[in-house]
Amino acid sequence: MNFGTWNVRTLLDNTDSERPERRTALIARELGRFKIDIAALQETRRAGEGQRKEEKGGYTFFWKGLPEEERRRIHGVGFAIRNDLVKHLTEAPTGINERLSTLRINLAKNQQATIICAYAPTLDADEDIKEKFYCQLDTILSEIPKEDKIILLGDFNARVGRDSDLWPGIIGKDGVGNSNSNGILLLTKCGEHNLVITNTLFRQKNKLKTSWKHPRSKHWHLLDYVITRARDRRDVLLTRAMTGTDDCWTDHRLIRSTMAIKIVPKRRLQERKTRRKMNTQALQEPSKRALLQTTLKDHLPTEHPENVEEHWNKLKTSIITACEETIGYLTKKHQDWFDDNDKEIQQLIDNKRKAFQTWQRDTNCAAKKKIYASAKAEVQRRTRELKNIWWTKKAEEIQHLADTHDAQGFFKATKIIYGPRNHGIQPLRSSDGTKILKDKTSIALRWKEHYQNLLNRSSNVAEETLSQIPQQQTRDELAALPSLEEVSNAISQQKNNKASGPDGIPAEIFKEGGPELMQQLHQLIEKVWMTEKIPADFKDATIITLFKKGDRTDCGNYRSNLRRENPRKNPCKPPSPCLRRHPPRIPEWLPPLQRNSGHDLHCSTAPRKMQGTKPTSVHGIH
């Protein structure tokens, strides 16, 4: 694996600076050029904690910085992890503070490694700040299990020198220059934890060791390090500075370390298929509708098992197979202003890189410096121009959709302009707030605990009050089996372009499936009615958590959306016979949304509506 450390100066997109837009996209392409698997980034300058996925760039960025209200300029650490590796992570990166972040990965042979991203205070910082940083680093190192590998990456603003006799086992014989006070602090900490600085282990030219050039003296220094346990030094094949790196508007070079270790792919006990959206737009063509009905007629089963669950699964499989053969699935098209203009932007960056390397070979040549400055300015000018063109076209498209009252297209186009989506694992605090949960299993259990406490509260309503609720007269006619006409009317009243349930079959398929499908659905509903047993697909709910504000690790700072089918959305899910025969009178203190129809709970907003109202219970939430 290739690990990297890079002080990128910023990941912010500031239109007032000399840097072009979308720093994450620029950094991602440069990391990809040098085949970096995991990179530690310093001086990210992004406030708070978050992540961003660059689809075409191939990396997901995680960062931790100061809170939004603190306006200090230089701060922030983070990781850039290859997208195909993110899915194998069992824990999310954990931001300790604006100077330290950690990541734990599983390796081959049942080994683990803890990766630390560090950004140490500068040489002229207060001694108290330096002492606080190294105390925090010492705490992190002490808490790492002894059997774990340690990969410490970062900009330590320190020079460790080349006196290997004074610091045996900590630095090698191939260091650079002399040490300074910050370097002594780093060397001392490495000695306490039996660590070795791998930058000093390999004999190579000085330009392949140094990472930063002093702006006044023009001397090159080594400030960015890759540090491991001394016992694991054989894992490190080579650590060097990448002199061919594009400057990316930063004064630090990328340091790459190649190690003989490998991440173990995460095992899946059961293959989990991603549910895809069916191309229901194709049903607007009469020929497609006719083809779907014909194909369904051929695939629908003629005999059904007695068990309701098996009956529905057999019918569901037939419907999905027919849809795949006729209308197919929607293809997801990634849209982003940077990625849509990737080819032209990449050509501009290549020209700038060539001009930069030409000038670096002769830094005293004013003409070459001018050519490089011109190429640099052209990247900035043209990328912002391309961005404005893309945004203008997108604005005209959205305006047209609004003028034509195409609500679905309007909201779909609006979602695109928000840029790359955030993906990955979001750590949570334990219920007592003392521990940060980072692995998926613990996070899932924490959400389960949260919703069990939120949705299954004990009722404070007195039994005498319930007995005083007047009961309506039993309507025996409602106990009759639903007719084919009732089922047909219920299906025709369903709305289009709505999210499908766990089965993945949208309402449009039922509406356009033809009389044969209608007859099959009617038979299923009759069986459900008689047996009073409902298939699991009709009972399961998907909980969608939407972050509001505040601390992302607190479950209480999320608004919850429970996507669960109810009798009004799916004709296959009628209310039970007892509810149809004995419709109860609902107490006036219940919120209108829960009193909606007298027999069903609209779950999509139940959690937030229940807070501050009379407690109720919702069971069967999965």
Image: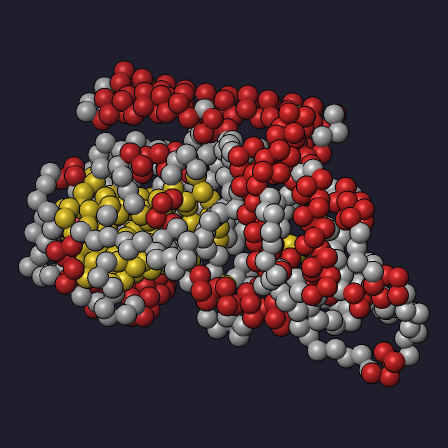
Instruction: Judge left or right: residue 594 versus residue 14.
Output: right
User: With respect to residue 83, does 478 lie above or below?
Assistant: below
User: With respect to residue 293, does 135 lie above or below?
Assistant: below
- Residue 9 appears in the rendering: no
Query: Residue at 29% across / 45% down in the picture?
Result: 37
Front residue (pair 13, 146):
146
Front residue (pair 421, 303):
303
Query: Residue at 71% across / 30% down in the picture?
Result: 406
Q: Which quadrant: the C terminus? A: bottom right
Q: Quadrant of residue 460?
A: bottom right
Spot occupied by residue 617 in the image (x, y as percentages of width and height): 71, 71
Question: Seen from this angle, which residue lies furthest top?
Answer: 367
Spot occupied by residue 545 in the image (x, y as percentages of width and height): 59, 56
Front residue (pair 309, 539):
309
- Residue 516 appears in the rendering: yes
Query: Residue at 46% across / 29% down in the picture?
Result: 338
Instruction: Judge left or right: residue 595 versus residue 356.
Output: right
Spot occupied by residue 311 in the image (x, y as percentages of width and height): 60, 56
Q: Quadrant of residue 367?
A: top left
Q: Quadrant of residue 547?
A: bottom right
Query: Residue at 91% across / 73% down in the picture?
Result: 471
User: With respect to residue 387, does 2 lie above or below?
Assistant: below
User: With respect to residue 247, does 303 lie above or below?
Assistant: below
Spot occupied by residue 498 in the image (x, y as percentages of width and height): 67, 43
